[in-house]
Every structure is written in C-alpha cells, then in structure tokens.
Amino acid sequence: MSEHIVPVRIYVTIFLVLLVGTALTVAAAFVDFPGRLNTIVAMTIAVTKATFVVLYFMHVRYSSRLVWVIVASALFWMAILFALTFSDYLTRGWLSVGY
Amino acid sequence: MDATTQEVHGHRALQHHFENMEQQREAGTLGMWVFLVTELMFFGGMFLAYTLYRAKFPAAFASASNHLDITLGALNTAVLIFSSFTMAMAVYFTQVGKQRPQVICLVLTLLLGLTFLGVKAKEYHDKYEDSLIPGRLIPGRPFGPEVAHEGDHDPHKLHLLGNATVRQVEMFYWIYFAMTGMHALHMIIGAGLLTFLLIFSLKGRFDPEYHSPVEVIGLYWHFVDIIWIFLFPLLYLLGRHMEHV
Amino acid sequence: MKPIESFELPEPPKVNYINAQYGLKSWLLTKDHKRIALLYLGSITFFFFIGGLYALMIRLELLTPPGDFMQSATYNKVFTQHGIIMIFFFLIPSIPATLGNFLIPMMIGAKDLAFPRINLLSWYIYLLGGVITIYALLAGGVDTGWTFYTPFSTTFSNSYVVATGLGIFINGFSSILTGLNFIVTVHTMRAPGMTWFRMPLFVWSLYATSLVMILGTPVIAITILLLAFERIAHVGIFDPALGGDPILFQHLFWFYSHPAVYIMILPSMGVISELIANFSRKNIFGYSFVAFSSLAIAVFGFLVWGHHLFVTSQSVYAGMIFSFLSFAVAIPSAIKVFNWTATLYRSSISYDTPMLFALGFIGLFTVGGMTGLFLASLAVDVHLSDTYFVVAHFHYIMVGGALMGYLGGLHYWWPKISGRMYPEGWGRFSALVIFVGFNLTFLPQFVAGYLGMPRRYHAYPPEFQVFNVLSTAGASILGFGMLIPAIYFVWSMRYGRHAEANPWHLPGLEWRTASPPPTENFEVTPIVTWEAYEFAPAEETEVVGKFRPELERI
C-alpha cells in the first residue's frame, strides 16, 4: 500500500490550531477594525482553518498531483462564478447617461 | 487470508472490474473528490447570493446577524471541529488496524454530529418563537419579528442598526435558513453514512488493506466541516463589532 | 503490429452481453455498462418522441398567423415543455449515457466503468426525474419557458413550476453521477499502454463533457431549489419586494445552462472526430489540437453566460466582457472544424451513412456557430434577441449539430452494439431526408427572426407567414426522416445482416472484440502499443506528434 499514514501528533496539533482559530475569530469579531478589515480578518482566519483541514485532515498534503489539481479547479470555478457575476453588479452604477 | 489466496482471488473486497486494490482505492478516493467539487459548486450559489445582499444591505445584515446566538454558534463550531478530529483519528486507527479505537472514534464523531444538529434544532426553534422564519413558510406565523425601541434590551426583539428595515432583515434570514438548512441536511446524510460505517466497523469489515469507505466518508465529513467554518463567521460574526454602536 | 485487414478474431463467442443472462431482472439490476447504455437508449428515445410531439404542435400552430390552433396560455406550455423535455431528458443525456456508457470502457480497454452500480443508479434517477416531470406535464403543465425566469415563475405563474423543477433537479443528479463516473474511469482504468494521447478523441470529448457536468449542474440544482422554495414560501432572494434581484436568478440559471449547451455539443464533436477519421481512413489531422480544444471549450464555456443577459439590466460593461469572451469561445470550435477539414483533404472518403451525418454536421454546425457570432455582438443582439434568429441558431447547433452526431454515432456503432447491420440504402436515404427537412425547417427562421418575428409568440403578423409555412413543411419532412431510422433499427435487431467483429475494418480498440461484445468486453485485457487512428503499420507512418510520457500521469 502506498498510502501515507499521518502521525497522531499532527492531527492533535491541527485540531488545537483550529480551536484557537475559532476563539480568535470570535474575539476579533468584537473589535471595531477600520473599514472592511473586520471581514478581511474573519475571512483570513476562515481560509486558514479550511486550508489546514484540507491539507491535513483530508490528506491533500500527502496526495497525488491530480488531487491538488481537483481542489484548485474547484476553487477556480467558484472564483469564476463570483468574479464574472460581480463584473455585473459592481459596474452597474458606472453608466451615468440616462437610459 | 494467506498470500497465495490473495494472489489468485484478490482481497475479498476487490470488485470484479478492478485489477487490484490499489486501483480500486484510487478510484474511490478520486470519485469522492469529484463529488466534493460538485458540492462546493452547489453551496457556491448561496454564498454568491449572501455576498451580494450583504454588500447591498450591510446594516440589515449586521442587525440580523447580531440576533443570532453567538454562544451556540461558537459551541457548534467547536463541536464540528472536534468531530473532524475524531473522524481523522478513526481513519488513522483503521489504517493501523486497531479496531476498538476506530469504533470509539466513529461513535464520537457520530455523537458530536448529532450534538451539532441538536443545537441547530434549538436555534431554529428560537427563530420560530421570534417569528423570524421567512415568508409564509410556517402557515399562521409569517415573518414578523418585534422591533426593539431605543433602550429596550429584550433579547427576543430585533435591534435594527442604521437604516436597516425589517424587509431587508428578512432577506438575511432567508439566506441563513437556506444555507444552514442545506448544511444541516448534509450533516444528517453524513450521520446516516457514519451509522453505516459503524455497523461495518463493528463487523470487522475494514482492515489496513481495505478501508476506503472510512477514508472517503471522512473526506465528506471534513468538507461539511469546512462549509461550517465559513458559515459561522459570515452568518454569526459579521456585525458584532457594531453591537454597541 | 499487423495491418487491420489481417486482424483475426478467434471464433466469435456464442455468449455476448445481450444473451449472457435472460429475464427482466437481469436487465433492471444489471451492472454491465453496455446494458445500462441500452436502457438509456430506450428511455431517451421515448422522451425524444414526446419532445417531438410538442414540436409538431408548435409548428401546426405557427402555420397560420392568428392563434387559432390553441390559446396563448396553452402555447406557452407547449413550447416550455418542448424545451424542457428536449434539453434535459434527451439532449443532455443522449450521447454520454448511450454511446459514452457503451464505448468508453471498450475504447480504453477496461472491463467496465469505475462505478457500475452508480451507473445503474444514474439511470433510475433519470427515470425518477422523468416520471415526476411527466406527472407535472399531465397534471397541467408549466408555462414559464424552459428558462423559468423570475418573478413570473416564482410569483405569477399558475402552473406546475415546483413539480417540474423537482423533476429537473432530480435528473441533474443523473448527469452528475454519469460525469463523475467517466472522469474517474478515464483517470484510473486505462489499459496498460493506453496513454492519454493514444485514446480516441471520442473519449477526450466525453471527458471534457464530464468536467462541464460536474462543475455546472450543481449550480442549476441549487438555483431550482431556491426557486421552488421562493415559490412555496412566497418570499426569497429573487424577490424585488425584499430588495432582491430577478437578474440574480438569470446569472445563476445561465451559469449552468450555457455550459449545458457544451454538454450537448462536445460529445457530438467527439463522434464526428471518430467518423471523419475513420471514414476517410486517415489519421485525424492535429490530434492534440482537437483533444485540447475539447478541454478549452469546456473551460471557456463557463465564461460566457452573460451573453444571455445582454438585454437585461446587466451592466453594459459586464456585457462587453461577456461579448469578448463569447467570441473567444468560438475559436476552439473553429479549430476542430479546420482539423476535420484537413483530415478530409486527400483522404479516401467512403460515403456510408455515418459519414453523411458527419459531413452534414460540419456544414450545419458551422452555420450555427457563425450565427452565434451575430448574437455575441452586443449591438446586433439587441435586435436579434428573443427573435426567431436565436431559435434558428440554437436549433442548427442542437439538431444540425448534436443530433446529427448522435445519429451518425448510432449508425456507426450499431453493429458493435447489436451485432447487426442496419440497411445501408435506407440509412443514406434517411440522412438525406433529415438534412433536407432540417434545413427547410430552420433556414427560413433565420430570415423571419432577422426581419423581426419574436419567439414564443403563438400569433404573428401576416408578413411572416411564408417563412412559417416553409418551416412547418420542413418540420414534417424532418419528422418523417427521423421515423425511418427508428423503424429500421428495430427491424435490424431481428432481420439485419449479422455483423462481424470489425465490419468497417478500422483500427479502434472497440473493433477488436466481438460484435456484440462479451460482458467483460475483452477476453484478455489488451496491452496497447499503437497510436490512435493508426491506419498504416507503424513502420510506414510518418510520425508527426510524439508520445509524451511526462503527460501520462495526470
């Protein structure tokens, strides 16, 4: 079997990191950061947590290149959905000529 | 099973159209990953709607979000993360062939998942009590929360921030129920899958050579956890810094 | 490697996948991809005829300018249901679920797909979705257009929107499972020596199709669910009363439905690649270009959906981006057409029925594709949107393109599937009738649309009548032409000439096993040492493209 067995200490570490991340995001939510920073902080923490789950709990760090490509493609397609839809909503107010 | 029997017939779990267990395992894992891609795109539409309307009605979304119970939400997040850990440990114990800890971890994962669903049920009930279920989904109890006036600290009443309106708050709750409801549905399916895993584990079906179902259902479970990792800050935390403004 | 003509199959086996087991249960509970393909073949043919009946009703109504055959409310239901049945229950599953299911394992040297039980499940899901949709049609139908635009579908329509939506939603899972199965199969189950660049182009295009199915279908699934809940709860994210945007529905709907048209055409293009190469007995020109263009179409196809929203409140800047991308998506399709043409050049063409369909495809798809460019231009689209020009455009692609490929493929692989030959004379005759009927039906619609006739209207100004009469006449011929193969295929199953393993004398892997094949496809797992479409022995071919091992692992 070519399967990689992840050592227990890694699982425990990641688990603790995730709990810390949760506590951090709750605490940060009550701090009034300037502008959009609240959202950026929250999303950064969420993305970090998700990355750890994907890489270690879901074994992607130890998986084949094909699995990496699949994960990357999924994220890319979500990005397409968001980016092109927002290309509409963000630019609607640009045309100031009456029509 | 001795080596010669395995050579001739293959592992007892080898399906006839595969050449060997390695190919079968690879196919199973790949299949689940492809399925998770579809799941991500499925939730993606709702995340898109959330993003759009949050940008459009920031005050209403903050008001509505603050009305959610942050303690229950944070608790649920911790519960789900813990269940992801126990699920990963279940896979580990199967890989090293320790059946008893494997079963214990599966049981823990299942119990934690059910805990999550229980807490969710309580939250939904609270929303029902406060008439926050959108539209006319509940006959006889349309969306119609009581709005708190200046100085009123009744937790059941909705505190509106800025120029938020009740109609816009209803939009938040529509998205809240759609996203958490869909997530809860996936948890229920996951719980069902875990039950199957548990039954097969108790029968000793899995060994270091063959444990693909444990791994693959683990992937699914972690994915559902990841969705919640995003739902929690987006739904529960977005307006907390404005709570006392 | 021996030349094809001297390839011998040992004494054809008495037992093949059809007679291996008897009884309804052995068919309904089968795990054999070939039997599942036949189950699908029967079901999609059934839905095709229902969709065709709706088409007949449309053309009868449009024979005369006033709305005299049916009321406008009924007509709305008829064109809606024609679209829903044809798109979701015929075109999308057609080639993948029948020819794809049957041939992919054989073309890569595998015994079956990666997940045979999921394959069977996908057929049952397809049936469930179909039954629910038929129930909705019989109970009273749906009148929103197959596009289900809000707020009509969420608030004002009095028809069976939720039931139909449920049928389509369920059917979507069938699509997803099929795509998932194909992707995993192609990655993990190729026979030894079958590298990516030795695979037939049919497999490449079905792989690309599967990518689209996987990435797009879930989005329409959630969109339909949200639509249904909005209708049930009387409020939702598309509701203007809440500050919602009906255009959001269109964004989400078309994010899938545009790539869906590539689900419909890519497999057909794969068939055409097979037909052109094999019936001109020449290696396909530019194999890697054709292979990569399939992937390019799959990717680019996801970037253009906004061209369906040009005349909505979508931002004009977004419109410009989508317009540019819509022009770009034409390029990989054009690459294919050029490569097919280059394959035909100085080749040895045999005008058998499959080749007739393939040649028809090239012409008709080109017309359909070029008229798409008209629609991709923002300014021109303002005039052509929601006219018969659009209707003619997509029918040229879907009927002139997708359906021709499907029919060509059915004829080509019929001997392999059934062990019998269809009657060649009748085959050529039907191809001709279909071609003539098709053009007579849809060419006048380009003109009518250009001159301003709106679509989805049951009554129209008298100046458009001549085009509609021509169109209806053509539709009758087309309908007649489609009945002929239906009859002779069934006839051939009992009375057709028995086909040998390789009746066309071709090098493909699927021709190296009996017709019909045994259940496990190959007596011995093949070890592949030759390139795709290798008509001449290796020593005598000039190798233009080289086998590249570094691309093999993915």
Image (tube, coloured by chain):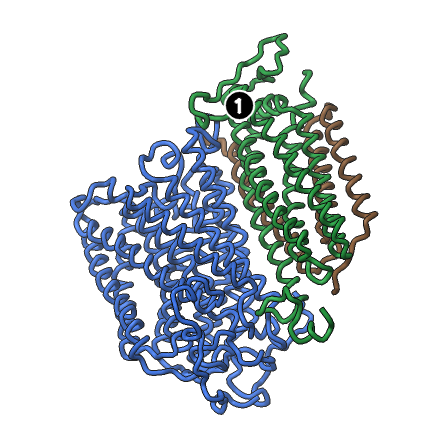
Chain colours: A brown, B green, C blue
- Side of C483 where B94 appears, left or right: right
Displayed quadrant of residue A35 = top right
At x 40%, y 41%, the residue is: C311
Q: Answer whether residue C365 is visible to the viewer in this image.
A: no
Depth check: give the residue in front, C371 or B215. B215
Residue drawn at x 66%, y 29% is: B73
Q: Position of residue C459 (x, y in %)?
A: 21, 44
Locate residue C279: give its quadrant: bottom left
Structural crowding at the residue carrying mark 1, measured as other residues with C-alpha within 10 Å and reported as few (<14), some (14–19) or many (≥20): some
Residue C540 at x, y percent in the picture: 56, 89
Does any portion of residue B187 appear in the rendered image?
yes
| Image vertical order of residue B104 relative to residue C506, above or below | above
Residue C202: percent from left, percent from top: 49, 69
Which residue lies under the disc numbered 1? B128
Quadrant into which the N terminus of chain B falls: bottom right
Nearest the camera: A9 or C248? A9
